[in-house]
Image (spheres, helix red, strand yellow):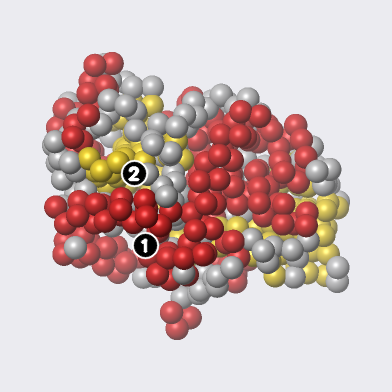
Amino acid sequence: MIPAQKIYWHTTVQMPNESDVAPLPNKVEVAIIGGGYTGLSAARTLAKQGVNVAVLEANTIGWGASSRNGGMVLTGLKLGMQSVMKKYGQEIAKQLFQCSLESIDTVEQIVREENIDCGFRRYGHLLTANKPNHFESLREEVEFMDKEFNHRLTLLSRTDQHAEIGSDIYYGAVLDECSGGLNPAQYVSGLASAAEKAGATLHAHARVTRLERRGDHFVLETERGSLNAESVLVATSGYTSSVTSQLQKKIIPIGSFIIATEKLPDELARQLIPNGRMIFDSMHYLNYFRLWDNRMIFGGRAAFFPETSKTIQRSAEILRREMIQVYPQLENVNIEYVWGGTLDFAFDMMAHVGEVDGLYYSLGYAGHGVAMASYLGKTVAEAILKGTIKEHPFASFSFPGAPLGLYDGRPWFLPLAGAWHKILDWVE
Ligand SMILES: Cc1cc2nc3c(=O)[nH]c(=O)nc-3n(C[C@H](O)[C@H](O)[C@H](O)COP(=O)(O)OP(=O)(O)OC[C@H]3O[C@@H](n4cnc5c(N)ncnc54)[C@H](O)[C@@H]3O)c2cc1C
């Protein structure tokens, strides 16, 4: 029997105070919409420099993807570096890859400086090959990353991979020891405390319902009154709404779902993932999994639509089946938790930052936001302090909308996209 939606991570930490409804200030220098990693990391950076900053969150602080994710702190971007290089050229690709390495350093630094108890460690990640030709692509990737980026990866054959994973279904894997892992809810909760300690004010249950430019400032109407701000940062990720309709039209909200098993005996947990790596596979409809406190945390894009009680239940069944395919050892293990959250995909699968007339944004992490949202939140805040974002590497390429403008923020094409990905997984 699979339980109803319950986020396992939330049971491991006291999430920021739900009943905290301190009155909104009348006026701030910077208002941030969204209280996840992006908003809180930016708020911490700005407040540390003495900026008067308020975070406005529709639900509770950390409510969105930031407390629901897999906790994988990954190198690289969603789009493979070979594709990034083909599209944007060598120089930009090198800058972006460097940013991805710095994004992990950023998480490490925040955790250390703020003393956040979230189990961050450089566990390394393992990308597994679901088909023999995927393994050949991984071999090319290892050579490419070494030659172009001087980034060392380890290719593991079907036999060698057993030192890293207790499963027989993969055709080999690649190991990147730079990546890390953490408990996402503990991290976002610690980040919220750090932003507050630096002087930012955090406002739960303050959904922004209207945003308007009036002369030299913005007026933000919220469910709890309005406030004026000189600048605004939109940090709403997969939950971006018609309040910022131009951004909503460029972001596709996609569901991702996770199950967590009961606690496994030490020996079994060690057998499944001997070195505690963060693992994901090479499919379009990919699965990702890891251990935490001897539980198997197994996620995937089992349904494309964002989380509802229906997509969560369906996903739980699919994920359980897929987990057992990877690990038949878990056939009789209980699933104690299941939950979903929403990811933010741009049409080019890249993260984007920018500014239009004092309105800043950072979004489009496509499943790489634990590190990237922490980093882009921080560096966009630095750009706000400087007064220009033009030099930011993630502002150096265009932010495309839907082909032919066929999207108004309601993702009617998700069933088609889901079917298309299934076809790709079948033929590629
Ligand atoms: C199931 C799942 C697994 C994932 N696994 C990983 C992983 O292992 N590694 C990884 O790197 N990434 C992963 N991700 C992605 C990662 O969690 C996100 O990229 C990251 O948390 C984005 O942070 P954020 O602060 O930009 O957005 P969020 O944390 O989503 O926060 C956005 C907030 O904006 C608020 N909001 C929206 N509209 C308004 C409004 N009008 N007014 C006020 N507030 C508003 C929302 O309530 C929400 O809390 C996963 C995501 C999901 C859903």
The residue located at (56%, 24%) in the rendering is: 117
Location of residue 146 with respect to 420 vertically, above or below: above
Of the residues shown, which amino acid type is indicated by label 1? Gln
Along the line of sight, which residue is nearer the eye, 145 or 395? 145
Relative to the observer, which residue lies in front, 379 or 295?
379
Image quarter in which the C terminus is found: bottom left
Q: Is residue 82 visible?
A: yes
How many numbered discs, if any?
2
Q: Position of residue 94 (x, y in %)?
A: 49, 58
Tell me which residue sits at (41%, 47%) in the image: 151
- Mark 1 — residue? 82
Helix, strand or loop at mark 1: helix
| Residue that appears at 22% across and 64% down | 424
Q: Is residue 303 above or below residue 83?
A: above
Q: Mark 2 to mark 1: distance in Å? A: 15 Å
Relative image position of residue 40 (x, y in whole percent): 65, 43
Q: Residue at x 52, y 41 (%)?
A: 104
Q: Is residue 308 left or right of residue 247?
A: left
Q: Which residue is mark 2?
A: 153
Q: Is 196 positioned to the left or the right of 135 in the image?
A: right
User: In which quadrant of the rendered view does residue 237 lie?
Assistant: bottom right
| Identity of the residue furthest to the bottom in this view | 404
Tell me if residue 35 comes above or below residue 421 in the rendering: above
The picture places residue 269, in percent across and down from the top left corner, at 27, 22
Q: Earlier in the sequence, mark 2 or mark 1?
A: 1
